Image (cartoon, rainbow, N blue to C red):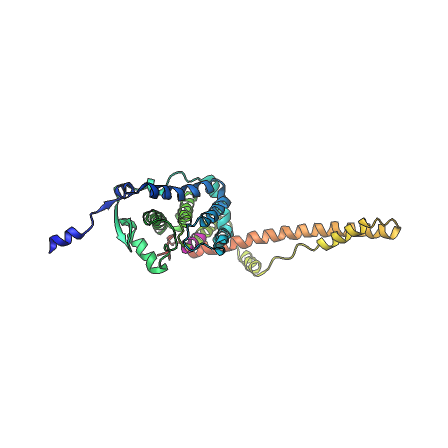
Amino acid sequence: MVEQKKLEEPPSQILEEFLDSFKGDETKEAQGVFEDYNRASQRGAQGVFEGYNRARQRGVFKDYDRESQRGGTKYRLYLGEVTTQVMKMLVSKNKITKMPWENWNSTSKLIKVNNYMILENLASILKALFGKYGDFIGKSGLSRKVKMLYIMTVCDAIDSMCNTKVVDITANVLVCWFHSFMLGQYAGFEIEFAFDRLKRVVCAHFGLQANNIPIDPNCVRLFVEIAEQGDPPTGAAIDSKEELAVIEQDGGTNELNEMVVSSMKLAIIKLDEEIREVEKIVKEKHALRIMWECFKDAVALLGEMAGTSLC
C-alpha cells in the first residue's frame, strides 16, 4: 500500500527542471510579457502604463472589452500622485535588464499550491494571498506554466516586502517591487492589493526622507487647514481677455474706446499677476498637503514591515 502511494506521488522538481520543461510557444509567451514591459519601461513610467494598455488589447486578459481599455489610466490614478511621480523618476533611472527568474536559485524546489507550481519558500505567501484575495490570477489569458512564472515573480516581491522594514527601504528596493508588480499586471493578474500597499510604503518612505525637517504644532495645524481646503479657481481672466479682444477687433478709434481698452489692459495685467500669485500659493499648499499625507503614512508604518497586511 505504501509502495503504491509512493508511485502515485509526482517526482520532486527544481526550478531548472521546470524552466527546461517549457516548450517553444511557452518560452516565447513568457519572454513576450517581459519584453513588452521592458520596452515600455525604457520610456519611463508613462510608457509602462501605455504598454500595459496595449497588453490588454492583445488579450492578456480573458474578458478584455472596451471598458478595460482604460486600464492604463485606472492604474496610473490608482497608484496615487506621490507614487506615480516617484516611480517616473526611479523607473527612468533603473531599467529592468533580466527576467526575474534568472536571479533565482536554479536548484530551488517547487511544490504545488492550488494546482500551480511555485518555489517552496513562496508557497505560504501564495496560500495566504489566495485565502485573502481569492483567485486574482483567473482572468489572465496566459498559458498555465507562464502564469506560474509570473505568480512567482509577484510572490517573490511580496516576500521581500514582508521581510523588509519600512525604515530600511531604499530606492532600488522600491523600483524592484514596482517592476515585479507591473510584470504581474502585464501578465493579466488582478493585484490592486499589492499596489495599494506599495502606494502607502512609497509615501512613508518619502515622508521618512524628510525626518530632519522640524515640525512644530503651528505647522501641523497649517497642514490640517490645508488638507481641508479646495484649490481656488484660476481661470478668472479668460472672459476679460476675450472681451478685450472683441473691443480691439472692433477697431474703435474714439477716445472713450481707447480709455476702456487701456483700463482693461491694466486690469488684466494686474489680474494676471494676482492669478500667478494664487497659483504659486496653490502649488505650495498642494506640496504641503502631499508632504502631510506622506508624514502620516511614515508615522503610521514606522516599525512595520513593508508587506504587513498584504498576507
Q: Nearer the viewer, residue 60 or 262?
A: 60
What residue is drawn where x is 49% and y is 41%? 43
Q: Nearer the viewer, residue 289 or 257?
A: 257
Q: Position of residue 7 (x, y in %)?
A: 15, 51
Residue, far bottom: 228
Tell me: 132 left or right of 277.
left
Tell me: 281 left or right of 69.
right
- Quadrant holding the C terminus: bottom left
From this view, report whether residue 17 is shown above or below residue 285: above
From this view, report whether residue 310 is shown above or below residue 58: below
Q: Nearer the viewer, residue 52 or 274?
A: 52
Tell me: 41 left or right of 231.
left
What residue is drawn where x is 59% and y is 51%? 284
> Residue 300 colored magenta?
no
Q: Position of residue 14 (x, y in %)?
A: 25, 44
Q: Position of residue 215 (x, y in %)?
A: 52, 53
Question: Magenta span covers which residues?
Answer: 192-199
Q: Nearer the viewer, residue 68 or 15?
A: 68
Q: Position of residue 120 (x, y in %)?
A: 26, 49
